[in-house]
Image (cartoon, coloured by chain):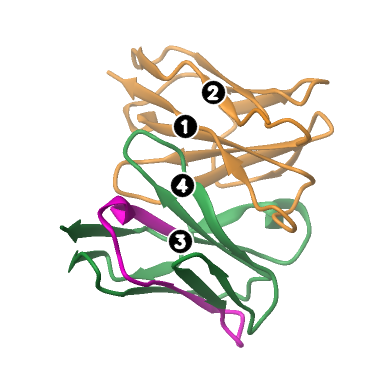
Chain colours: A orange, B green
């Protein structure tokens, strides 16, 4: 079974630019969650997508937005990039909205550097 | 953002030793998860706990869901060099909206000396 794949693996952007990160969920999973992991910290929840709609959001501003497609893949968009947005962005997929039964499967992440 | 209290922050042990780490929270969780993260990779699920008091093993790993639902621990027995990495606990609140999110600890960095 195919795991969670994310692209690109690394990205360097300039402050003020916009970025789109992509995620393909694990086969059989219909829910995608996005997390931001700053250096030396645990992942922080950004939002979750279920049935192509945002289903829960963490403490992130509106310039963080996302999409989920009919094939359950997802995009994370960040506008007006700030230096503090530099982090590892993780996508996690699951079979259903909660962690029951199987937990969440994480991708390897996209390392975003804002200069 | 909110994070769980995970301890210790780091551990340096000799190969063959046992390891114990734990997480506490001011909130009640209905699910506790333990993940391991290697450099440049995403977290990999080690053990999932769904019931207060539950004790679950996965090979040399054992984890427990605290009776109060506010804590969990992970034990690793007879450590080996490939156990090196960062271990994270994560909790999930009871169902609904943003409660589907996972709240993570800051991690425990484990170093194993051969």
- Mark 1 and mark 2: Cα distance apart in space: 7 Å
Tag 1 subunit: A
Crowding at label 2, few (<14), some or many (≥20) Cα neighbours within 10 Å? many
In percent of width and height, residue B13 lies at 19, 67
Q: Nearer the viewer, residue B74 or B97?
A: B74
Tell me the residue that label 4 is attached to. Answer: A43
Badge 3 marks a residue whose secondary structure is: loop
In percent of width and height, residue A89 lies at 47, 32
| Tags 3 and 4 on a common chain | no
- Mark 2 and mark 4: Cα distance apart in space: 16 Å
Tell me the residue that label 3 is attached to. Answer: B3
Crowding at label 4, few (<14), some or many (≥20) Cα neighbours within 10 Å? many
Badge 4 marks a residue whose secondary structure is: loop
At a point 65% along the width and 28% down the height, the residue shown is A2
Circles 1 and 2, Cβ within 8 Å, touching? The answer is yes
Residue A6: mark: 2
At a point 27% along the width and 59% down the height, the residue shown is B110
At a point 45% along the width and 61% down the height, the residue shown is B3
Tell me the residue that label 1 is attached to. Answer: A108
Q: Nearer the viewer, mark 3 or mark 2?
A: 2
Q: Which residues are magenta?
A: B65-88
Circles 3 and 4, Cβ within 8 Å, touching? The answer is no
Circles 1 and 4, Cβ within 8 Å, touching? The answer is no
Tag 4 subunit: A
């Amino acid at each position: 079974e195919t795991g969670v794949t994310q692209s690109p693996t690394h990205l360097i952007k300039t402050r003020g630019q916009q970025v789109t990160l992509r995620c393909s969920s694990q086969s059989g999973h219909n829910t995608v969650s996005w997390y931001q992991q700053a250096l030396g910290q645990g992942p922080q929840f950004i939002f979750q997508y279920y049935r192509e709609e945002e289903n829960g959001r963490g403490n992130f501003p509106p310039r963080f937005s996302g999409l989920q497609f009919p094939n359950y893949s997802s995009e994370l968009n960040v506008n007006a990039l700030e230096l503090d947005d530099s982090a590892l962005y993780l996508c996690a997929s699951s079979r259903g909205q909660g962690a029951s039964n199987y937990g969440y499967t994480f991708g390897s992440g996209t390392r975003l550097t804002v200069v | 953002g909110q994070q769980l209290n995970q301890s210790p922050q780091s551990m340096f042990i000799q190969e063959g030793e046992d390891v114990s780490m734990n997480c506490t929270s001011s909130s009640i969780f209905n699910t506790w998860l333990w993940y391991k993260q290697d450099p440049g990779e995403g977290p990999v699920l080690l053990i999932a706990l769904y019931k207060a008091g539950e004790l679950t093993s996965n090979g040399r790993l054992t984890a427990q869901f605290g009776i109060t639902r506010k804590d969990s621990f992970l034990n690793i027995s007879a450590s080996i060099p490939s156990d090196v990495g960062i271990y994270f606990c994560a909790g999930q609140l009871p169902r609904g909206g943003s409660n589907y999110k996972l709240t993570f600890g800051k991690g425990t960095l484990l170093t194993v000396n051969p």
